[in-house]
Image (cartoon, grey):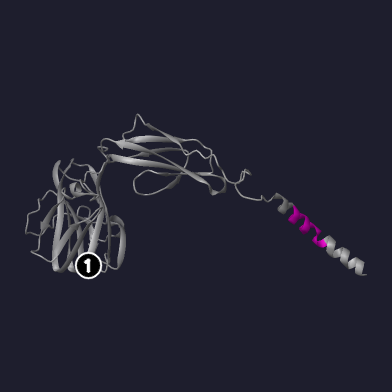
Amino acid sequence: MNLHIKLKYIIKYLPLVLIGLVFTSCQPDELGEGNGLIADNLDADFTINEVSDANNTYSLNANNSYISSSWDLGKGAGFISGSDAEEVFFPDAGTYTVQHKVTGIGGASAVSSQTINVATSDPIAGNIVKGGKFENANDHNEWTILNISASGANWTFNDGSATIVAGGWNQQAIYQPIEVIANKKYTIDMVVSGDGNNETWFEVFASTTAPTQGNDYTSNVVMGLNTWGGCGTGSFNGLLSSVGCVDNSYSNSRSNEVTFDTSGTIYLVIKCGGNQTPGITISNVEMRGSN
């Protein structure tokens, strides 16, 4: 009887014992010691070629000796998953550091980088706002401060952004002239952020009406924030086209698109004011055309 019970348990657990022995025999003593579990020959190099029939467009080509591939195009977005062949478009003039990151077996990785120099902005999709990144004094000088109230509201230029602080129902704006083409569609946008603003308005205008010092500006609002309208309150950070709640006077709808009847100079005006406005910060101001 006892022998029968012991044999039954041995037969029952024998497959598990055998599996354990096989699994143990397959485990390496150390990871990465020539057993192939960590790649040691990753190649992240790539070539760059201009696409002949497309403006400011480049083809990026790498080998395929890895598990995953990602690219950083030098536009501030960081690494984004991709393939070994990518076609990329740079609408704005500038110098871009393109990085290619590859990941292999065991999580090993390698990075290679090259520089692309874009001489001129694309005439259609290029950003026609000057100094929209607020990166340095040259960018700051592209903007003129429009003093609407005598005091109580002030724009300041930072490294990479501009900030407006206001109180006591005062307001101030910044603006610049921009050349546009008649009946061409343009989109306007920027990154806006803030926290703790109350009784505040923030408006973006695009109009042929020239600003004048000491006077309010109200001509052709395109988009904005308004705490009475339900946006610009609390903590926010994002594209104005997404977080804003002011209708476009050109279309009477929520849109950041504009067109102009005649070619020539228009004025991009960014105005903010309020009773309790501890700060709204903007960066990456853009105005781009499309077909």
Q: Residue at x 31, y 60 (%)?
A: 237
Is 234 left, or right, of 149 in this rendering? right
35 versus 252 height, above or below: above
Q: Is residue 227 visible?
A: yes
Q: Is residue 246 visible?
A: no
Is 14 left, or right, of 171 in this rendering? right
Tag 1: amino acid: Pro
Residues in magenta, as a range: 12-21
Q: Residue at x 35, y 38 (%)?
A: 115
Identify the residue at the far top of this view.
52
Is 185 left, or right, of 66 in this rendering? left
Please tell me in which quadrant of the rendered image residue 114 appears: top left
- Residue at the spot of label 1: 278
Decide which of 166, 122 is in the foreground and name it. 166
Quarter of the image with the C terminus in it = top left
Please tell me in which quadrant of the rendered image residue 85 appears: top left
The number of discs equals 1
